[in-house]
Image (spheres, grey):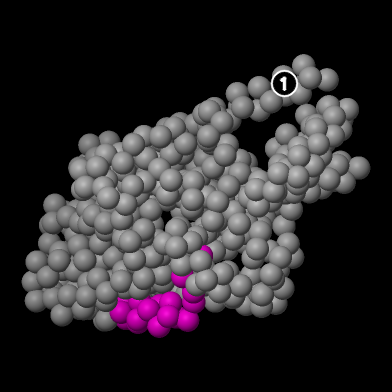
Amino acid sequence: MEVNDERECNKAMLSYHSNILTQNPDKLQESKKGIETNDNDELNNNEKLLCDEEEDDVPVQYSSNRKSVFAQCMVAGAMLMLNVGVGMPIGYSAILLPQLSEVNGTFHIDESMGSWIASIHSLASPLGSLLTGPMLDAIGRRSCLQLATIPLCIAWLLIGFASNISWILFGRFSAGFGVGMCSVAVQVFLGEVIDARVRASVTTASTTAYCAGMLLVYILGSALKWQTVAFCGTILPIISLILLTTVSESPAWLVRKGKINVAKKALMWLRGDDAKQVTTEMSILEARAKEDLSRMSLSMTFRERALETRAKVLHPGVLKPLLIINVFFLLQVCSGTFLVVSYGVDLMHHIAKGSINKYMAAVMTALIRVFFCFLSCFLMLRIGRRAIALISAIGSAVASIILGVFLLLNIQDTGFEVYVIGICLIVYVSFNTIGLLALPGMMVGELLPHRARGVGGGCTMFLYNFSLFATTKIFPMLKNMVGIGGIFLIFGASAVLETIFTWLIMPETKNRTLQEIEDYFKEGNILWIRRKNRKQRLSVSES
């Protein structure tokens, strides 16, 4: 009965929005009557509303046919291939630094230079992210991704042919710039073209591909010289560039640029020639585009455009999701998600104290990361985003705190210390991956409204990557100050703060369309808990 009531409510909602978009007065009056009748039914079933508060307002979805599935698989395949290529330079420092630190290495480096090689990648990524914001709106999502493959290829060639440390630094900088460009564009592109029911799983799969790239570079680095690994890194960006030419541009971007016929053609391909669904989605896209363009003037000076962009970012409907995303990202960085990646091999050496092969240990953690990222794709279909984030943050906090305390106590020669460290490390990587690593990219594609997705995504990834640079650069100094045990206690404290933040503020977006998520922030909502309680009190008072 509850499912039937929910479906009836959703059908009435869909009818109501469709009539508004067609601007038919007669049908508009009929839809209003339908909503009034629907409201009476909701008041009579108030108890059911209280039980289903997490799953309300779920939109009616059309069934995907084979053509639609094939088209979206092509888009997802191109994005996944590119993300594997993007993941390789992120994990590259973990295998590069130990080889360069060897006495008989090609270029011998000290700890300070090693921190620059590891962190300069993250210093360049914010620049790529910031530039990508305007580029996404100017040249399109697909074109921006194609352009991003160029600095990636240049980076690997610079490193492969490096004759001194400067070449390696320039190569790492170029790689970071390309990664910054991709990090925004991939999530925005997937968020706009993939069906809402599988959007979370596909965007999470892109993070899995990210982790697969790190795993690939760890495996190659354990067997090959760093120069050979660099040349191997050019292969995937080139393949991605070719694959991107076979998929269509984002219909949402095409509509905003006034290319209605091209947008319809692209949407027909993505939705498998389902004319009914294409008509509905085009109506929504055109209405949103007109609403956004009505706020803009075509004859604006650069200063006026800058002020308009500033006003757009500071609008409550944009600022609120921006703050939520950036706080979540900052706490994720402080919980050690990417520090374990950048310094993976060295961390394994310090933690295990030579009792295990550091390269094999790093490969095993990367393999665990890929598995749990893959598992997260399926969990996204069954469990809400908030639940996954809470489970991930709590598990990361418990494991890292236990590991930090154990390392600080410096328990040795007991015969079981290796097992305790190994179990805690596996649990930490597993829980950290399943939510804290998998969710951020999806949040950019889901929470930001369409009118600010380019600029907002660019600003978000700028701040995110700058925080990655700062933490990666100071990590060696912090490690010398507090030790590895102290580092993991900091990871645990950050994960505890992430848990509190998620419970209080992070909104649930499972089974919500991008339009419904955008409307949620327009309604003045900040705290998710207050939003739920207010809705419950309203339902009770009306009954």
- The reply to whether residue 423 is in sight is no
Residue at the (30%, 71%) spot, across then down: 147
Q: Is residue 239 left or right of residue 266?
A: left
Taking the view exactly as shown, the residue that stands out farthest to the front is: 25
Where in the figure is residue 110, as x and y percent of width and height?
Answer: 12, 57
The one of 83 and 300 positioned closer to us in this rendering: 300
Where in the figure is residue 285, as x and y percent of width and height?
Answer: 55, 56
Q: Is residue 303 left or right of residue 411?
A: left
- Residue 128 figure quarter: bottom left
Q: Amino acid at mark 1?
A: Leu
Please give the count of numbered marks on the rendered protein: 1
Q: Is residue 317 above or below residue 96?
A: above
The one of 116 and 78 positioned closer to us in this rendering: 78
Q: Is residue 452 magenta?
A: no
| Residue position marked by numbered label 1 in the rendering | 538
Where in the figure is residue 303, as x and y percent of width and height?
Answer: 20, 43
Magenta segment: 232-251
Residue at the (35%, 76%) spot, across then down: 237
Taking the view exactly as shown, the residue that stands out farthest to the top is: 541
Q: Element at badge 1?
A: helix
Q: Is residue 234 magenta?
A: yes
- The reply to whether residue 146 is in sight is yes
